[in-house]
Image (spheres, grey):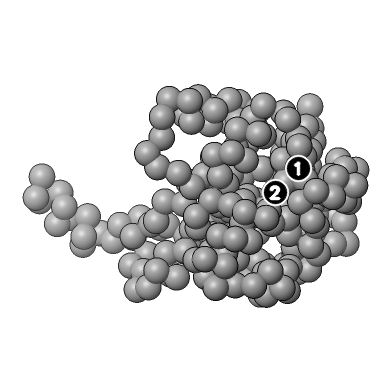
């Protein structure tokens, strides 16, 4: 079986690296937007392929006051959500994988069922069948048992479930710091180095000694 690491090795030998970014209608469209802006600045020259749903455009307008055109301009290539004939809908089209940020419960459920009624779920299905990386930033809380079981099922299929959980050890000063770090961590799962998420090197000895004394 061709593992994800071997798939990436083969793809990275191609001249152009590509990542599909899906934005669903869940709250938190800023995660997808930041993924696109970070990829534009990335020194690895990643070509971004955007799929944004109609509900996502409504949410982005409400939360960020972004027009459809301003969203499209952030991507290198835009695919419309009902274009099942798009290049990324085929497993023969090489990509590093797909990040759905945010991923709504509806989108998650559609992917897990294998019902590819839209391009975003079709491409996600392609990533799973081709053993490529699929990262789902599930944006929902609290979660009931059906949600959790669906996440387990997708994990068994090979997807990575990554809720946008903030990290505080980086000492963020703004909300955008939190968002950018979370997105950078998601992109690192594809082997994309953004220079945004620092490598954890452990707690400093002095702090560690103080903690040990308290215990």
Is residue 125 in view?
yes
Dots 1, 2 in contact, CB < 8 A: no
Point out residue 94 in the picture as x, y percentages from the top left corner.
85, 49
Residue located 77% across and 45% down the image: 119
Residue located 42% across and 64% down the image: 178
Quadrant of the drawing holding the C terminus: top left
Indicate the secondary structure of the residue bearing disc 1: loop
Report the front residue among 114 and 167.
114
Left or right, 203 with reference to 122: left
According to the image, label 1 marks what residue? 118
Is residue 131 in view?
no
Left or right, 121 with reference to 139: right
Quadrant of the drawing holding the N terminus: top right
Left or right, 100 with reference to 62: right
Point out residue 189 in the picture as x, y percentages from the top left corner.
60, 50
Report the front residue among 71 and 193.
71
According to the image, label 2 marks what residue? 98
Looking at this view, name the residue that lies furthest to the left.
Answer: 214
Indicate the secondary structure of the residue bearing disc 2: strand
Q: How crowded is mark 1: few (under 14 residues within 10 Å), some or many (20 or more)?
A: some
Q: In which quarter of the image is residue 51?
A: bottom right
Q: How crowded is mark 2: few (under 14 residues within 10 Å), some or many (20 or more)?
A: many
Report the front residue among 82 and 187.
82
Left or right, 199 with reference to 118: left
- Asked if residue 111 is positioned above or below residue 187 in the image, the reply reads above
Residue located 84% across and 50% down the image: 83
Mark earlier in primary sequence (1, 2)? 2
Residue located 68% across and 53% down the image: 53
Specify the label residue 91 is tagged with: none
Q: Quadrant of residue 169?
A: bottom left
Point out residue 209 in the picture as x, y percentages from the top left corner.
17, 55
Q: Distance between the residues labelled 1 and 2?
A: 15 Å
């Amino acid at each position: 079986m061709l593992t994800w690491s071997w798939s990436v090795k083969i793809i990275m030998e191609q001249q152009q690296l590509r990542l599909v970014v899906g934005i669903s209608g869940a709250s938190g469209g800023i995660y997808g937007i930041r993924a696109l802006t970070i990829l534009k600045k990335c020194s690895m020259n990643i070509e971004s392929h955007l799929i944004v749903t109609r509900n996502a455009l409504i949410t982005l307008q409400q939360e960020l006051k972004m027009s459809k055109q301003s969203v499209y301009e952030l991507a290198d290539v835009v695919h419309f959500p009902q274009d099942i004939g798009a290049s990324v809908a085929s497993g023969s089209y090489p990509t590093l994988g797909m990040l759905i940020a945010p991923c709504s419960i509806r989108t998650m459920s559609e992917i897990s069922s294998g019902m590819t009624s839209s391009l975003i779920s079709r491409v996600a299905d392609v990533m799973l069948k081709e053993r490529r990386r699929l990262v789902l930033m599930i944006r929902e809380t609290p979660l009931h048992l059906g949600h959790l079981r669906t996440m387990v099922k997708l994990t068994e299929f090979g997807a990575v479930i990554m809720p946008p959980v903030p990290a505080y050890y980086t000492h963020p000063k703004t909300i955008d710091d939190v968002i950018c770090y979370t997105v950078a961590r998601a992109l690192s799962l594809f082997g994309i180095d953004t220079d945004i998420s620092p490598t954890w090197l452990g707690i400093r000895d002095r702090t560690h000694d103080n903690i040990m004394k308290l215990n």
